[in-house]
Amino acid sequence: AAKIVKQAILKELRELKKIPAEKLIESRLEKYAGMGFFDEPAK
């Protein structure tokens, strides 16, 4: 099972390396910006 997980992770890393860092950062910012805002009231 560990071998299969390792192969899957390595495959995904190879795909991610093809994407420029700027694009990855932009995608991450859009993802988190779309989640909205959470505010916990003070006690």
Image (cartoon, helix red, strand yellow):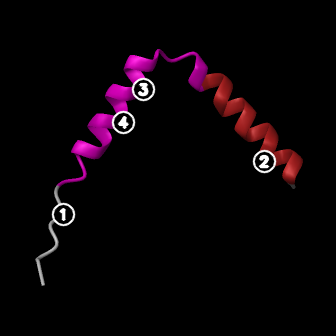
The residue nearer to you, when weighing 39 against 34, is 39
Q: Alpha carbon of mark 3 to alpha carbon of mark 4: how far? A: 6 Å
Q: Alpha carbon of mark 2 to alpha carbon of mark 3: how far? A: 23 Å
19 lies left or right of 13: left
Q: Which amino acid does label 3 sit on?
A: Leu
Q: Alpha carbon of mark 4 to alpha carbon of mark 2: how far? A: 24 Å
Crowding at mark 2 (Cα within 10 Å: few <14, some 14-19, many 20+): few
| Residue at the (18%, 54%) spot, across then down | 36
Q: Check the picture and name the quadrant holding the C terminus.
A: bottom left
Q: Alpha carbon of mark 3 to alpha carbon of mark 1: how far? A: 24 Å
**In what element is the residue under mark 4?**
helix
Q: Which of marks 3 and 2 precedes in the sequence?
A: 2
Magenta extent: 16-36
Q: Which amino acid does label 1 sit on?
A: Phe
Q: What residue type is labelled 2?
A: Val
Quadrant position of residue 26: top left
Q: Which of marks 2 and 1 precedes in the sequence?
A: 2
Q: Main secondary structure of the magenta part?
A: helix
Question: Does residue 20 show up magenta in the picture?
Answer: yes
Residue placed under numbered mark 3 in the picture: 24
Residue placed under numbered mark 4 in the picture: 28
Q: Where is residue 23 in the image (x, y as percent from the top left)?
A: 39, 20
Residue placed under numbered mark 2 in the picture: 5
Q: Which amino acid does label 4 sit on?
A: Arg
Q: Where is residue 5 in the image (x, y as percent from the top left)?
A: 78, 48
**In what element is the residue under mark 1?**
loop
Q: Residue most toward the bottom?
A: 43
Q: In this view, does 22 lie above or below 24?
A: above
Asked if the residue at tag 4 contacts the one at tag 3, i.e. Cβ–Cβ closer than 8 Å, the answer is: yes
Q: Residue most toward the front?
A: 43
Residue placed under numbered mark 1 in the picture: 38
Q: Alpha carbon of mark 1 to alpha carbon of mark 2: how far? A: 34 Å
